[in-house]
Image (cartoon, rainbow, N blue to C red):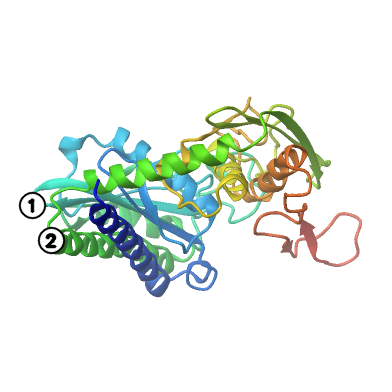
Amino acid sequence: MSDIGAIRMQVMWNRLISVVEEQALTLLRTAFSTSVREAGDLSAGVFDPRGQMLAQAVTGTPGHVNTMAEAVLHFMHAIPRDQMFEGDTYVTNDPWLGTGHLHDITMVSPSFLNGELVAFFACTAHVVDVGGRGFGADGKSVYEEGIQIPIMKFAEKGEVNLDLVRILRANVREPNQVVGDFYSLAACNEVGHRRLVDMMKETGLASLDGLGDFIFSRTRDAMLERIEALPKGSWSNELVTDGYDAPVKLAATVSVRDDHVEVDFTGSDPMSRWGINCPIIYSKAYACYALKCVVAPDIPNNAASLAFFTVSSPINILNAVRPAPVALRHIFGHMVPDLVLGAFSKALPGKILAEGAGALWNIHISARPVAGASGRRAEVLM
């Protein structure tokens, strides 16, 4: 590629990031839930027709962004290409196919140009309520935690599935806010689609294949260079934190190979009877976040950069399986970065951020009665 061609591709890469930034801002500005509008509890991104993330919005959380990157492939598996149409929007809150608990709604929309599928847009937001017991750890299975929405169409050819809307209204405590957020998520993807089409028409692109190849090849080369510079070997770390019945142990082994980095959560405590279990899709998201902070914090996050990280685990609290309760999966999911960084600190002593209080969330407070206490007092849930 000529220097001019490379510069042009770099400009278009930046333009693509601006597209998803506007996509995310649409969600921030139109969302009904406070957690989205004021805390940025969301993600937004654009994907190629094979479901590979090309770019993500800077706005958003690692747990939403990196789970969304994997979730799009689940949508593509569930909805065949011949059943995808212009004006479609697909939705789910399946914890094992989405972001780890029912409160997060993930929407995916195909983007067409001149009748051809050129991209997918995806976004995620935490809604105020999904019914069930509410946002707490009291449920003994996912069935008690709220309404479950399998991967399905929220809209087909621009027509909203009103049966789904009626089911939602009958199952949540704040129907106007929840349904409003569904429309906000759909609008978020629609804005991304419109801006992408404008960009492609302006630059004369019929597909994103060339730009995708440029993004992924540059990312792969940069990631390989960073991984090659790391010491090779395996290092383990354990972290003990408060639980409900007893302290919970999390364990991880980080292994740096010639061309990738592995994380294994073997040794972590078994699944809990409380809703603090974490599906592997969410544990993986925060493990990859920690790895990228060490390996390549300045390299854009996309399918090529995430492909260098593999995460595995036997069934345990960081790899909970259905129908485990998972409403507060972030309680331990947000401990995963410190867990992984603790292992990496043995490979790179003096170069890793010291352990803190988790990635994003420090404390949860309720006002439930506590056994043995007189009256009511705040109960700290870690």
* Pointer 1 residue: 114
> In x, y percent, where is residue 314?
63, 25
Q: Residue 287 — which label?
A: none
* In the image: residue 319, left or right of residue 353: left
Q: What's the residue type where badge 1 is placed?
A: Asn
Q: Nearer the viewer, mark 2 or mark 1?
A: 2
Compared with 58, 154 (above or below) is: above
Q: Nearer the viewer, residue 276 or 53?
A: 53
* In the image: residue 362, left or right of residue 74: right
Residue 203 in sight here: yes
Crowdedness of circle 1 by 10 Å Cα count: few (<14), some, many (20+)?
Answer: few
Given contact means CB atoms under 8 Å apart, are the residues at marks 2 and 1 in contact?
no
* In the image: residue 134, left or right of residue 66: right
Quarter location, residue 251: top right
Q: Nearer the viewer, residue 156 or 220?
A: 220
- State the CA–CA distance, disc 2 to disc 1: 10 Å
Q: Residue at x 76, y 61 (%)?
A: 368
Q: What's the residue type where badge 2 is placed?
A: Lys
* Pointer 2 residue: 201
Q: Residue furthest front?
A: 3
Compared with 260, 145 (above or below) is: below
Q: Residue at x 56, y 27 (%)?
A: 258
